[in-house]
Amino acid sequence: MALGNSQALLEKRQTLGEGEVEISERAFNLIIGAMLLWGFFLNYVTVAAFGRQVMAMVYGMNPVVFLISYFVLVLAGNALVVKGGPALSFVGYTMIAAPIGILVCMSVQGIPVDTVKSAVLITAVVTLSFMIAGTLFPGFFLRLGRVLFFSLLFTIVGGLVSMLLFRGRGYMLYEWLGAGIFSLYIGYDWARANTCARTVDNAIDLSASLYLDIINLFLRILRILNSRRD
């Protein structure tokens, strides 16, 4: 799920800005990996250490207030990631990952640990596979940008509608479609990362995109596995 995915911004990231220093490919990839781990660590701590408190807070809040607070944090974090330097991008990334940890906490409630572990493993395998595909076939994935953007809009709208109206087969078809879209997004964002200038700021920005891709994929795989178990 690319953040700030305009053509102008993509072209800007392909060149060094004023005062920016290019880092090695190894350092660039290490920063992306470290940022992904940071996001997943925040989610793990939220679920493992504060799950009960988080759920009590969610159930005690007005749903409208919760949704507004969630989207304000995520959108503000997105703005910092897209427009800020490395330090602000890190803060923005954290502002995105922290509230998503609440969604993860809500999603795993009542689901057996073995099912959650299976979802994590499948997500890891799919993520690695599409990263490799994005490296081997960058041209193919980069051409998917507009298609994936409109697919993402459909996914967001469809997700909201499905939570309110759909059940059974129709709902699960949507989950499979969403899993496919975010799998392709992983390949797209990884191919995009390989075309950008290797700077600390770009590494953090691209980590945010990949993090959102992977979390969205995980949540859909989790629901698919839990539905099959039921």
Image (cartoon, grey):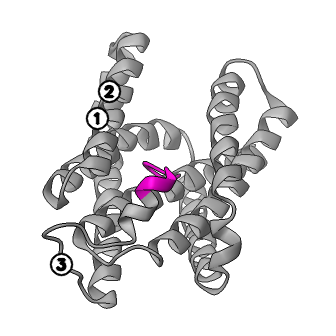
| Residue type indicated by callout 3 | Val
Pointer 1: what residue? Answer: 76
The foreground one among 215 and 58 is 215
Res 52 → quadrant: top left
The foreground one among 63 and 205 is 205
State the SS at label 1: helix
* Mark-to-mark CA distance, 1 and 2: 6 Å
> Percent position (x, y) of residue 228?
78, 49
Pointer 2: what residue? Answer: 72
* Mark-to-mark CA distance, 3 and 1: 26 Å
Pointer 3: what residue? Answer: 21
The foreground one among 169 and 116 is 169
State the SS at label 3: loop
Res 63 → quadrant: top left
| Residue type indicated by callout 2 | Val
Residue drawn at point x = 61 percent, y = 34 percent: 156
Residue 25 visible in this rendered orientation of the protein: yes
Residue drawn at point x = 57 percent, y = 48 percent: 219
